[in-house]
Image (cartoon, helix red, strand yellow):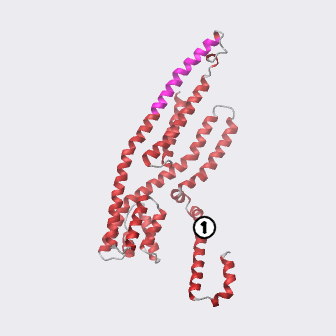
Amino acid sequence: MKLTEFLKFNANDQDMLTEEELTELEDTIISSKMEEATKNVVIKEFMKDPLNTLYNYPIYTFAISLPVSLIFFAIGYIATQGTPIIDDVIIFTVLIAITPPAFTFHKKYKRTDTIEEYLPTFLRDISEMSRAGLTLPRAVNTVAKGEYGALTKEVQTMDASMSWGVSFEESLQNFAKRVPTPIIVRSVSLITQASKAGGRVAAVLEAAARDAREVKILERERRGNMMVYVVISYMSFFVFLFVIGMLTSTFVPTMAEAGKAAQAAGAGSQFIGSFDPAKYTRLMMHTGVIQGFMSGLVAGQMGESSVFQGLKHSIILTLIAWMVFTFVI
């Protein structure tokens, strides 16, 4: 039953309701209104600030890039159907589809990384002000005037929500929902659970800041160690590209000459006599492009623990393979 129908149905009975039932009815109305207000929130944010919304929700960038890439493919397919240039159309169709998402995913990754870097400093500042006797809302209001990089906007959002009566714990939980990274969720859970247990807030904030800083240091060390595997992915791709490039530039022409000699000797019906160099060169290009794309995804997963972060590597390696076979070989 819709809210309006529910109110009309109970309009004549409200005088007969108890105080508890009226309170429950008010809570139901408020909850329904809040649900209606949060519907299509991403669409509303996109209409207000498209670029910032795509940075916050990079997965939705595919909703723009995929239609554009399909239009490009349709036009290119009609213009190049039946010719080898269709390969270039397919390659650039894929690149058009993944380039905007790769940029927005990288942008969001850098933003969340900056927020996590400043989080221990923010929590430590709140802890020190709490020890000095300031209330948590007043402490947040004070530090909101400082500079915390990408975290500054989130701190100002928490300050605004607390000025409307939202508790410090709930503001932190809303912050964790907006930026749900493991470090932030871990820190917020630690603070809220300890606060509910009745611990000293200043000590809890200090412990959370120390924990977040140590986790970030470990993550930075892991990222540095895994960067070696990103380099290995690039090197293995270049070795593979060099090998198939040499095969294409030396082996294929040799086989083509042998095929012509076989045809001249009357062996045209044999395999070597029907050797098509363009066909095998095209096959090598397909192999190099696919290898570059997949190597990029592997590099992103191993180096930054995200396949989406590998899209930028895939773009670079795919373009290198395409340019080598287009302009060099």
Q: Is residue 198 among what the camera can see?
A: yes
Tell whether 195 sits left or right of 131.
Answer: right
Q: Quadrant of the N terminus?
A: bottom right
Q: Determine the residue positioned at 69% across, 78% down.
A: 5
Q: How many marks?
A: 1
Residue 247, compared with residue 318, is above or below; it is above
138 drawn magenta: no
Of residues 236 and 51, which is closer to you in this image? Answer: 236
Residue 288, compared with residue 257, is above or below; it is below
Q: Determine the residue positioned at 44% across, 56% down.
A: 111
242 drawn magenta: yes
Residue type at mark 1? Answer: Lys
User: How would you classify the magenta stretch by its main secondary structure?
Assistant: helix
Of residues 157 and 200, which is closer to you in this image? Answer: 200
Of residues 177 and 62, which is closer to you in this image? Answer: 177
Q: Quadrant of residue 21?
A: bottom right
**Magenta span of residues:** 238-263
User: Residue 206: x percent and y percent?
Assistant: 32, 67
Q: Determine the residue positioned at 62% across, 20% down.
A: 275
Q: Determine the residue positioned at 64% across, 49% down.
A: 67
User: Residue 291: x percent and y percent?
Assistant: 52, 36
Find the residue positioned furthest to the bottom: 15
Q: Is residue 144 among what the camera can see?
A: no
As helix, strand or loop, the secondary structure at mark 1 comes to loop
User: Residue 75: x percent and y percent?
Assistant: 68, 42
Tell whether 16 sits left or right of 254.
Answer: right
Which residue was labeled with disc 1?
39
Residue 90, compared with residue 49, is above or below; it is above
Find the residue positioned furthest to the left: 132
User: Residue 91: x percent and y percent?
Assistant: 59, 39
Neighbourhood count class around disc 1 (C-alpha, 10 Å): few under 14, some 14–19, many 20 upward: few
